[in-house]
Amino acid sequence: MADGARRTDRIRDPVHGLIVFGGSGDPHRDETDRIAWDLLNTGEFQRLRRIRQLGFFDLVFPGATHSRFAHSVGVYHLARRLARAIARREGAAHDPGRERVALLAALLHDVGHGPLSHTFEAATRALGRPRRHEEWSAEIVLGDTAVNRVLRGVDDALPGQIGRLLTDEDPKDIYGAIVSSQFDADRLDYIQRDRLMTGVEFGHIDLDWLFDCLEVGTIVVGGRVPVEAPCLYLGPKGVQVAEEYLEARFRLYRMVYMHKTARAADKMLEALFGAVIVDADRRKPPPREPLLRYLTSDRPSLGAYLALDDAAVWAAMSAWIDAEISGRVSELARRLRERELYKCVDVGAVDRQDGDLFDRFRRRLDEVSPAWLGDVLFEDTAFAPYRWYDFDDASALNKVLVKTPGGDEPTDIASVSDVVKALRPESRIQRAYVPRPDQAEELERILRDAERGAV
């Protein structure tokens, strides 16, 4: 393989085709690709091959077995395309150093994901461990890791710069928007990748047209002290593709990410972890498995976290099925392994907007108090398909901005698109899950009583 700027490495991706690292003819960008390739080959990054992007969702969509590794490579590829679009539009104002930080942060944005991705994060958050994967990602970048050594080999300041970018709540500049915004490389990849791997027919986005319509400009933000802030926006010909992008994300949430069967598995894992901790506290067993060691630790180390992947979770569940352990632990583990999932009663499907049926249903259920009440798992989740930000703050970089014909400056797409206006209201998912069909039928009767106001 050739050295220096001529070195190239390749990955063939089912979404983006051939992704080439190096060989662009731009020494700075080829050097960034070389760093990215070295990061990609660290143990911490290779661990992402063993973590599924969509957790338990292959229980519903059998093709959804793609990994966080594949997604992260795709995000890096799209981040480069965003960066090239910015460089073309910015001209002399382009900052190659800041671009490098953003591209490497995009590659590493998910390196801190736990097993089963968001499924594991939600389950451990319910146990009182609200640490987000972005925080673990930053710790991997800053800690005693191969990732950190690669970055420090380039520049001692690079880990700190990337770590800050990974934990920023909102983008601080136009390069930060590549990593985290409503129009970032992460979303552009997972919408396409999850659509392909789940096999759904909706959600195609014309990425070539989208990037061609992308512009760099400024927008006035701030209330009492207005200032000009840099922004990414789509020209008039890009409004329709922006609508397609947001509609695709909305439909993926409604029809894939919130699918009741996969969500039942998520809630069962949450209940399983809680039962494991109770059982471990009672029996004080030696925590042999990496997962049990992590769950029973008050302050798990980075090393303990990095020992976890999907295989560790499945191995632990298999051990819990056969071990002398509480019946609830072994039963939940067995059900998950054999796809004997809880049945769903969807309360939100019959509730009116902003209604209180879920609360009335739960009160009525407590009054009836069936013998199996302790087995009921509840879900009350809200998601907003599109957040409409106030221009009085500095959140312009977190909007999907478009410029209409004759417009003086870009504006929030929600102010000009009837499609996006229809997507704006917050959606609520309110459900109850029980082990048996007859219990679900009883919940349906209790729900009908609550609907009639029988409290």
Image: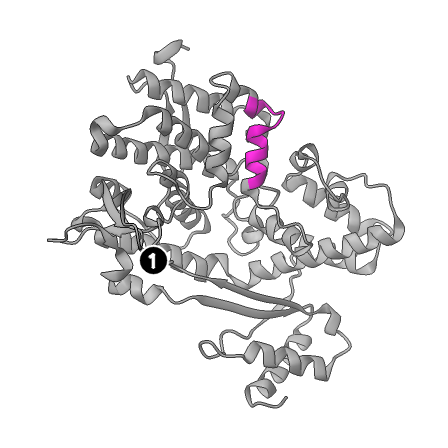
Compared across the picture, whether 19 is left or right of 439 comes to left
Visual colour scheme: one colour
Compared across the picture, whether 321 is left or right of 181 comes to right
Q: Residue at x 47, y 18 (%)?
A: 155
Query: Which structural element holds mark 1?
Result: loop
x and y percentages locating residue 388 in the rendered image: 35, 59
Q: Residue at x 77, y 41 (%)?
A: 293
Task: Name the one closer to the observer, 28 or 76.
Answer: 28
x and y percentages locating residue 291 in the rendered image: 72, 42
Main secondary-structure element of the magenta-colored stretch: helix
Q: What is the magenta range?
A: 135-148
x and y percentages locating residue 330 in the rendered image: 78, 55
Compared across the picture, whether 132 is left or right of 300 comes to left
- Residue 64 appears in the figure: yes
Residue assigned mark 1: 390
x and y percentages locating residue 51 in the rendered image: 58, 40
In reply to whether residue 336 is colored magenta, the answer given is no
In reply to whether residue 139 is colored magenta, the answer given is yes
Report which quarter residue 252 is drawn in.
Answer: bottom left
Q: Is residue 132 above or below residue 143?
A: below
Task: Name the one closer to the observer, 116 or 133.
Answer: 133
Q: Callout 1, which amino acid? A: Asp
